[in-house]
């Protein structure tokens, strides 16, 4: 009986942790989407943050990607890479691997 109760407690604990991680992603995405220039954003299951923007030449996209890393950090949303994506490549039904990246930033390297 005790092993069954221990397994049940472990399962419930894992479900609560997973729910918390998903909630962190929701708040992180809401914060990113509220930023100027952001048209859409998503986080995949591998920790990639995709931020879709309109390409403007006067913007340092690497700095913008680093700012997105800093923005999601307090939410603990499990984001490892931030990808700033040109909106024109998303609307054509292309998959993420085919999207035009304006910047790709390793969030763990950002202070």
Image (tube, rainbow, N blue to C red):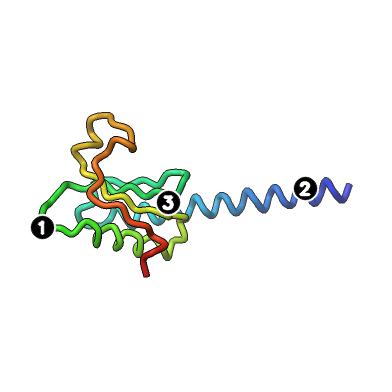
Q: Which residue is mark 3?
A: 26
Q: CA distance from mark 2 to mark 1?
A: 56 Å
Q: Position of residue 7 (x, y in %)?
A: 77, 48
Decide which of tag 1 and tag 3 comes sooner along the chain: 3
Q: Which residue is mark 2?
A: 7
Crowding at dot 3, Cα within 10 Å, few <14 / some 14-19 / many 20+, comes out as some
Q: Residue at x 37, y 50 (%)?
A: 49
Q: CA distance from mark 3 to mark 2?
A: 29 Å
Q: Can you say whether 68 is above or below 15 in the image? A: below
Q: Residue at x 18, y 59 (%)?
A: 60
Q: Position of residue 77 (x, y in %)?
A: 45, 56
- Camera-side residue of 64 and 98: 98
Q: Can you say whether 90 is above or below 16 in the image? A: above
* Most distant residue in the left direction: 58
Q: CA distance from mark 1 to mark 3?
A: 30 Å
Q: Which structural element holds mark 1?
A: loop
Residue 107: image quadrant is bottom left
Q: Quadrant of the C terminus?
A: bottom left
Q: Which residue is mark 1?
A: 58
Q: Position of residue 28 (x, y in %)?
A: 39, 56
* Left or right, residue 78 beside residue 33: right
* Left or right, residue 27 beside residue 14: left
Q: Residue at x 27, y 29 (%)?
A: 93
> Which circle, 3 or 2, is nearer the viewer?
2
Q: Which structural element holds mark 3?
A: helix
* Most distant residue in the right direction: 1
Decide which of tag 3 and tag 2 comes sooner along the chain: 2
Decide which of tag 2 and tag 1 comes sooner along the chain: 2
Q: Which structural element holds mark 2?
A: helix
Crowding at dot 2, Cα within 10 Å, few <14 / some 14-19 / many 20+, comes out as few
Crowding at dot 1, Cα within 10 Å, few <14 / some 14-19 / many 20+, comes out as few
């Amino acid at each position: 009986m005790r092993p069954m109760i221990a397994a049940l407690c472990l399962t419930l604990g894992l479900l609560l942790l997973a729910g918390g991680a998903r909630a962190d992603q929701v708040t992180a995405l809401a914060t990113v989407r509220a930023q100027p220039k952001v048209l859409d954003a998503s986080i995949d299951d591998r920790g990639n943050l995709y931020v879709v923007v309109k390409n403007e030449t006067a913007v340092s996209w690497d700095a913008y990607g680093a700012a997105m890393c800093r923005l999601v950090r307090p939410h603990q949303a499990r984001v490892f890479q931030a990808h700033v994506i040109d909106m024109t490549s998303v609307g054509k039904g292309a998959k993420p691997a085919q999207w035009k990246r304006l910047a790709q930033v390793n969030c763990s390297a950002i202070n």
